[in-house]
Amino acid sequence: MPPPDYWGTFSTSSIPTLTQVEQFLTNAHDQMASWLEEAGYSSTQTDADVLGALEPYNAYGGAYMVELTQPSVSWEPREGSRAYLFKQLFEEAKKLIGRDGLQLLGATKSKQLSRDLAAGGISISDKDTIEEDTDHPPYWFYRDLHQHPSTVKTTEEQEQ
């Protein structure tokens, strides 16, 4: 007797259906794309080595979602279950993406994560005291929490 349709072959009558499995794989891909963008990579990778490294994680994400459709699995996978294992393996992709391994394989960063960070400049005459320092750049980060001579004051204090 052949096994029931839901044992490893996805079709229109299986649980989940083939259409659902394809959507699960797309959902896992989209999640991984957001992790790539978050780490500064382009979400569209073309390098074969990079794709080869990421592909199993996409399958783990899809398998995790497939496991959640089975009657014996709750929506919150318990430790030791197949769903839990697939979820853990899928989430390892985020760790891989956060490291430099993809860059070593050939992935290029689409943006520098520090591009929006800024701090005050540097003073040439750094040996002077703060009161004597004429080229000291004003602080960029402040909120009247410190009584420092070069701290920018609120408009109310400046008018007085």
Image (cartoon, rainbow, N blue to C red):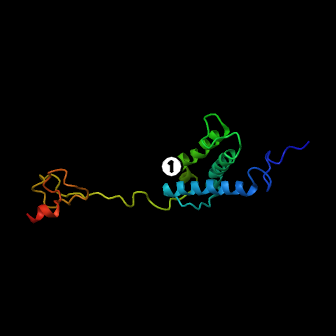
User: What type is the residue that disc 1 sits on?
Assistant: Gly
As drawn, the residue found furthest toward the left would be 160
Locate residue 13: give its quadrant. bottom right
Q: Which quadrant: the C terminus?
A: bottom left
Q: Nearer the viewer, residue 29 or 129?
A: 29
Q: To which residue does mark 1 refer?
A: 98
* Image spot of residue 54 (x, y percent): 62, 51
As drawn, the residue found furthest toward the top would be 80
Residue at 50%, 49% in the rendered image:
98
Q: Residues within 10 Å of mark 1 (few under 14, many from 20)?
A: some
* Image spot of residue 127 (x, y percent): 15, 51
Counting the numbered discs, the total is 1
Can residue 106 be spotted in the picture? no
Left or right, 75 with respect to 134, comes to: right
Q: Is residue 72 placed above or below 123 in the rendered structure?
A: above
Residue at 44%, 59% in the rendered image:
112
Residue at 50%, 62% in the rendered image:
110
